[in-house]
Image (cartoon, helix red, strand yellow):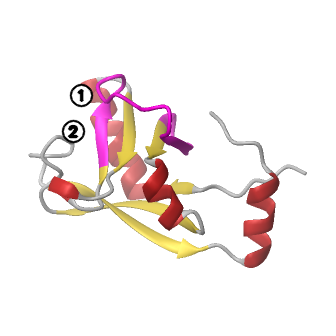
Amino acid sequence: MTSNIERVTATPAALAFIGELRRHHGPVMFFQSGGCCDGSTPMCYAAGEFDLSDTDVYLGNLDGAPFYIGLEQFGYWEHTQLIIDVVDGNGGMFSLDNGTGRRFLTRSRLFTDEECCQLRTRVPGP
């Protein structure tokens, strides 16, 4: 059984902002922060400038930008769809959105029971 349910999506405003950052910095990637310095902020990096671990989980991509989350954080959020948006404010200290006057923000919604069943049968990976 294949599923078209996405674990991560983005609003049109976020997709437009990703395009701006890509034009300025080249290919980008995301990592969903699990706390520490920048709270639970989706961090945007130039592709290859964030070292992924063997336990990081690939959630999908946003207009070609791969999106990852740490395994422990995924355990908390595996039943939710992450919806990446953009709002006014300061970005994360190390994120490419810092200094632009805008920042990425993670919103979420719970998957339905049916969606959870479909996701369990899907093979993960980029």
Quickly name the residue at label 1.
24
Point out the stretch of residues depicted in magenta.
Answer: 43-65
Which is more toward the observer, 15 or 119?
Answer: 119
Is 31 in the magenta? no
Residue 40 as seen in the image, left or right of residue 124: left
Residue 53 as seen in the image, left or right of residue 2: left
Which is more toward the observer, 88 or 72?
Answer: 72
Residue 76 as seen in the image, left or right of residue 123: left
Ranked by sequence position, the earlier of labels 1 and 2 is 1
Mark 2 Cα-neighbour bin, 10 Å: few <14, some 14–19, many ≥20: many
**Residue at the spot x=50%, y=57% of the render?**
74
**Residue at the spot x=47%, y=42% of the render?**
67
**Residue at the spot x=24%, y=28% of the render?**
24
Q: Which mark is residue 75?
A: none
The quarter of the picture where the C terminus appears is: top right
Quickly name the residue at label 2.
96
Q: CA distance from mark 1 to mark 2?
A: 10 Å
Amino acid at dot 1: His
**Residue 26 in the image: x percent, y percent?**
32, 23
Can the viewer see residue 62? no
**Residue at the spot x=38%, y=25% of the render?**
27
Is 46 in the magenta? yes
Q: Which SS class for mark 2?
A: loop
Amino acid at dot 2: Leu
